[in-house]
């Protein structure tokens, strides 16, 4: 009898989660989508319309400044009021509002709001991962140029340069030309061999903007 009771106490419950697993789950919660949109119940039925607007904005912003909006995660949130929406950028609330729950209401109001947020938060949305995509694109055309630039500048530096150019109202659509200008500026600032000199990405972007 005592042995049976002991076994009952020592037996691990089938669905029990270990302390280590709980800690891992907490760390997993530190990850946030770059762009996350929460929508209330009434708006959830119009998820396809939200997706269409985001697709159109991707095309429009790409044409305007050369930036491609990264993946946008949309999820319904029952805590919100029926017509409420919230836009989060890197886990921070960027916009909170209400929409008329029909296609025209979403298109008339959400389109402009979302586009404004993208431009206002470009520095946060333009992640290192996005910068690496631009690097890969140029690498395929001019590997020597990218190799020389990345000996001097980090991915973070390149991200700052590209986002600064957009923030100054210029386009990075011709990304090959932009990287050529980055290379020229490095040469003016001390050359490719000067690996120990600190090149200021904001200053490089400022000089490039003057030529665009």
Image (cartoon, rainbow, N blue to C red):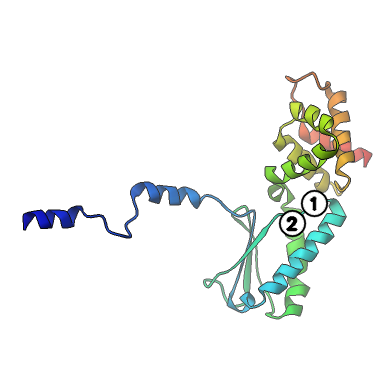
Asked which secondary structure carries label 1, the reply is loop
Res 71 → quadrant: bottom right
Give whichever of 195, 115 is nearer the camera: 195
Residue 59 position, x and y percent, is 82, 60
Reading the image, the residue beneath label 1 is 67
Residue 75 shows in this picture? yes
Name the outermost residue toward the right: 211
Residue 120 is tagged as none
Question: Could you tell me how many numbered marks the image carries?
Answer: 2
Quarter in which the C terminus is drawn: top right
Q: Is residue 4 above or below residue 127?
A: below
Q: In this rendering, would 93 be left or right of 183?
A: left
Q: Is residue 150 above or below residue 43?
A: above
Asked which secondary structure carries label 2, the reply is helix
Residue plotted at (89% across, 45% down): 174
Reading the image, the residue beneath label 2 is 118
Q: Is label 2 or label 1 in front?
A: 1
């Amino acid at each position: 009898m005592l042995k049976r009771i002991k076994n009952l106490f020592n037996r691990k419950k089938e669905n029990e989660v270990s302390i280590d697993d709980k800690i891992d789950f907490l760390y997993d919660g530190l990850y946030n989508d770059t762009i996350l949109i929460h929508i209330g119940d009434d708006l959830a039925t119009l998820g396809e319309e939200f997706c269409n607007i985001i697709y159109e904005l991707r095309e429009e912003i790409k044409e305007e400044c050369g930036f491609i909006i990264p993946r946008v995660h949309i999820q319904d949130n029952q805590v919100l009021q029926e017509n409420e929406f919230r836009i989060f950028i890197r886990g921070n609330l960027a916009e909170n509002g209400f929409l008329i729950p029909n296609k025209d209401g979403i298109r008339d109001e959400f389109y402009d709001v979302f586009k404004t947020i993208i431009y206002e938060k470009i520095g946060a949305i333009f992640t290192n991962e996005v910068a690496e995509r631009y690097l890969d694109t140029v690498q395929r055309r001019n590997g020597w140029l990218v190799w020389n630039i990345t000996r001097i500048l980090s991915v973070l530096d390149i991200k700052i340069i590209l986002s600064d150019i957009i923030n100054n109202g210029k386009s990075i659509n011709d990304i090959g030309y932009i990287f050529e200008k980055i290379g020229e500026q490095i040469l003016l600032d001390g050359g490719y061999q000067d690996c120990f000199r600190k090149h200021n990405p904001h200053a490089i972007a400022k000089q490039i903007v003057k030529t665009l």
